[in-house]
Amino acid sequence: MILDGVEIEDTFAEAFGMRATRLIVTADTPRWARIAGDTATGFATSVIACGAEAGIERDLSAEETPDGRPGIALLFFAVSRDALTKALRDRVGQCVLTCPGTACYSGLDEGERLPLGRSLRYFGDGYQAAKRLGDKRYWRIPVMDGEFVCEDTVGQVKAVGGGNFLILGKTHRGVLAAAERAVEQMRRLIGVIMPFPGGIARSGSKIGSRYKGLVASTNDAYCPTIKGIVKTALPPSVDAVLEIVIDGLNEAAVGAAMATGIRAACAGNDGEILRITAGNYGGKLGPFHFRLHELLA
Amino acid sequence: MITRIAGGRIIDGAEDEGDAKRDLWIEDDRIVAAPTDGRPADRTIDATEHLVMAGAIDIHSHIAGGKVNLGRLLSPADHRENPVERAGAALRSGSGLTTPSTFTTGFRYAAMGYTAVFEPAMVASNARATHLEMADVPIVDKGAYVMLGNDEYLLRRLAAAAEQGEINDYVAWMMQATAAHAVKVVNPGGISAFKFNARGLEIDEPVPHHGVTPRRIVAALARAVHEIGVPHPLHVHCNNLGMPGNVETTLATIAAAEGYPIHLTHVQFHSYGSEGKRGFSSAAHRIAEAVAQNPNVSIDVGQIMFGATMTESGDTQAQFRNRSLADPDTWISMDIECDGGCGLVPMRYRDSNFVNALQWTIGLELFLLVEDPWRVFLTTDHPNGGPFASYPHLVRLLTDRSHREDCLAQIHPAARKASTLAGMTREYTMREIAIMTRAGPARSLGLSERGHLAPGAVADVVAYRPDSDVAAMFRAPAHVFKSGVEVARDGAILAAPSGTTQLVRPAYDRQVERHVRRFFDDHMTIGFDHFPLAAGELADAGLAVAEQQCRPSAGRA
Amino acid sequence: MITLALRSRPPGRLSLAGVTPDRLAALDETAIAKLPVRLGNRQTALGDWFDIRIAGAGEDKLVISGAGGDRLDQVGGMMASGELTVEGDVGARAGLAMTGGRLTVSGSAGDAAATAMRDGEIRIGGDVGEALGGALPGERVGMRGGTVVVARNAQSGVGDRMRRGLVVVVGSAGAFCGARLAAGTIVVGGGIGDHPGIAMRRGSIVALGAAPRLAPSFADCGVHDLIAQHLLARRLALLGLGTLASRIGPLRRFMGDQAEAGRGEILVPR
Ligand SMILES: [Zn+2]
């Protein structure tokens, strides 16, 4: 398959089951909602060392939030309910509770609920109070600029993590520009995040390492600077590769994001981009397989 | 007025012969032999194929006294949700299932074929109020057991190594003073110990202040009750109620009686081992063995029935322990005059709860393992194990093995596995039911004119319409006669005569009054002269008092 | 829809507990007429008092109409779902122990409306008597959940021992409003009587009328425009109480009752 002059390899991205939730963080201004969101989703590129993968889903207008203030929707992904619970507690506790003027709500009302405000309330040292309005229960924790309001529990769903595609091109500059085009379009979608810096990863990895104790190491088959001495997957003219990794609330959202991203990366191609491919483990590890040709059909 | 109950199957537990199909004759308030002079009946009740028994007698049911009112106070929802309409011009309305109001208590008992109910936990200082409250319970005969064994005076005299004769005089005086029918000891010494902050008391552990052991208290009281000739033996609620492993205490209590008659009440709560992963197991077989080996012992079971109820007990120590189980979360503990008191804890027994489920099986095991129906009586310790309204279901559990096993299948699986109930094939016969609910309690309580159907007996008679569902049959008997008056038909109350107040008045040496008077002067807020119910006081208040005789063989040891 | 038209004012208190749309839905007119209802301490039948009409099947809707409804007690009692509308007044304990559904009374309600309520919604068009959402004698808690809106005034004891839920009185409330409050929210649009929140442990009383006289055991914590107030305003707006919601701005916060657990709040205009 050729798209805008780019070869789409007939392969698939292999993705995994994760647990995910959405938080809505509000603040006095959009700027402070964004600061809270950036902070809470920082250092969250990969569950390998960050405990969770997280990102900003979108900005919310005042009309869209529970308390009528500007806000931001954040998505969090982790390998299990327990890991998600812990990540939420730590991240909201350290990055939202601390952030001036914020409040934090569940943005997902499905699935078995995870404790959030219920865990954070103890910061109130006995001065915290619960408030139930309608079918929601909030904790009000006194802080120096008023009260930190945090919903008692948040919903969570079974989600999909690790959807991906790789952009192969002639130069670093050209591949980066294509990846940026892709991320810009993908960020308009609901239900997905691209957890790596700026949505883009350069350090594609393979499973295992020659060093004991390292579970993953550089994906040498896609590293152009050693292509002459390894069993490379790169055509001779490819000198740069970048990857976009997608976590989504469901399979459809991840697939749609991949298709959008690939199309955007290929659109306006001026000969810099040569090929699009995807990472997989032979289909044995992850239950979700996104075939590139099917996504783009 | 002669009534003929025609065509029924007479099941009289007190008669040795089997069931007989014959007419039963009633003249006024007595059962009579069939008239030989050809006098016709004024009315004939067609009881063809009906099971005809004497009125049932509940030997242990908390129906009056301060704790019952406190129980009502703690369970407004019981009254809100269970209103009982006035069923006729001469009748009264009421409310409540687990803590029914007085009228409802009497009507509901009578409608189920009960004609006598005994309140087992009368605080001596509250005797007057208890009797007046009982008098408010219509139709059924009533009597009360006065609680001794944690009372300050007795403990002091035992600590001072008083002679048995003095103890006997005090017990007899107290029974007369409180118009009691029998004597009960609740958690011997434990309630006094509780006031010194003890949370439990073992049978050979001295009460903190007095240094008297429960063993000594049980021995002294069992002997006193026997020697002053009270028909009903000492009614014992053992130490360590509800505690895992308390079977040892219960067996030690039997030994403590030193061969004198004792009645162990709500034994289900006292038949626990401490085996198994959860440290809680059935010891029903050990109790049943002990009952078989000790002819001086009788028991009532105190079966628990699943659902919400109120626990009302004189055992403030145990109830204080139980407060954490309160459902809803509310409880009361109180005491009068440092004499006695009560603890109230609402409870919800769940078949899905391992402990509750095992308690349920333990009660049924006791019923099925104790072979002599004359020495095991049907109770739920109303309302502690469940309301008395659940008796019909309990009868079905005892008489209908397949129903019992259906129920067993629904309880907590670990409790079902731990119990030997599944292998028990015994089904109570109607004759055994008649013994355990009529003849047995009557004999134990000295009610010579009740609990049987021989000529001369009080005409308390019940006719059950046979039904394959035994519970339905026992819930609403076709005809209930109290002293010859038909008071209920098919579960509906027809008339509401007052029952009698049963009591026993053992003799004592009046010397004892001088000592007790001094104690009252020094320690009690009520004057000695105001404490006893005066002779005729109950009659003056409109109560029909019926005194039962002491055993003639009684005498000082 | 089932309509029960009260023929005349009953001679005593008539309890309609259990006469609810969810329970009547499956019955025909004859069966409904036979339903037992208590007049005082006597059992009577629903058909003794009401003309019963069923129009259309399968709907959980019940309408009670006719003058003299002030003698009808426990209207909506034990209701779990459906809609019960009363055209006129009701007596005491309206919505007793409701667990769901919606009870709408166009007129006024007597004492102890919404007592023992767990969930659902009650709307009273007129006034209510004492102990709205309060505890019955002997009960440890009053209302345990749900929403009650009273369009006019409430007498004393609003939310006494209430544990959860939202009570809104658009008009004024009498003395002891929110006394012994365990938790939950009470909003009063108009004036509020003496001793508000006395012995309250947690929960909120939002008194938007003239500032009430507070016991000295309530501590002034300053004027705030808290997020919780925004959330409450949103909830009120959703209940169609936009005018009341718009009055929730910065409010002065008193915490109390310091003679009890002292974690409750009374919010008053600054
Ligand atoms: Zn008892």
Image (cartoon, helix red, strand yellow):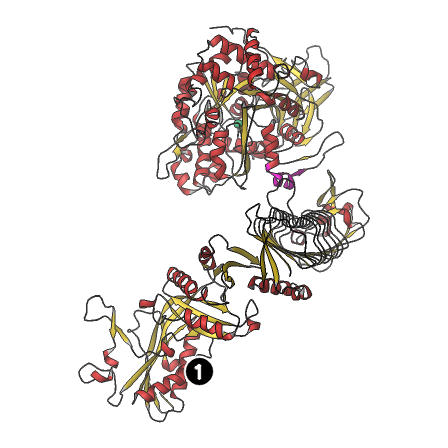
Residue at the outermost left position = A229
The residue where tag 1 is placed is A185
In the rendered image, is residue B317 in sight?
A: yes
- Which secondary structure, mark 1? helix
| Label 1 Cα neighbours within 10 Å, binned few <14 / some 14-19 / many ≥20 | some
Give the vertical position of B335 relative to C270 (above or below). Answer: above
Residue occupying the point 39% across, 63% down = A87
Residue B395: percent from the left, percent from the top? 53, 31
**Tag count in the figure?**
1
Report the front residue among B526 and B492: B526
Give the vertical position of C110 relative to B174 (above or below). Answer: below
Report the front residue among C215 and B337: C215
Check residue B78 for magenta coloring.
yes
Residue C184 is left or right of residue A38, and the answer is right
User: Which secondary structure class fits the magenta region best?
Assistant: helix
* Magenta range: B74-83
Residue at the outermost bottom position = A270
Residue A267 is left or right of residue B135, and the answer is left
Residue B239: percent from the left, percent from the top? 44, 26
Residue C11: percent from the left, percent from the top? 80, 42
Check residue B483 for magenta coloring.
no
In the rendered image, is residue B449 in sight?
A: no
Q: Which quadrant of the figure contains the C terminus of chain A? A: bottom left
Name the residue type under label 1. Gln
Q: Which quadrant of the figure contains the N terminus of chain A? A: bottom left
> What chain does mark 1 sit on?
A
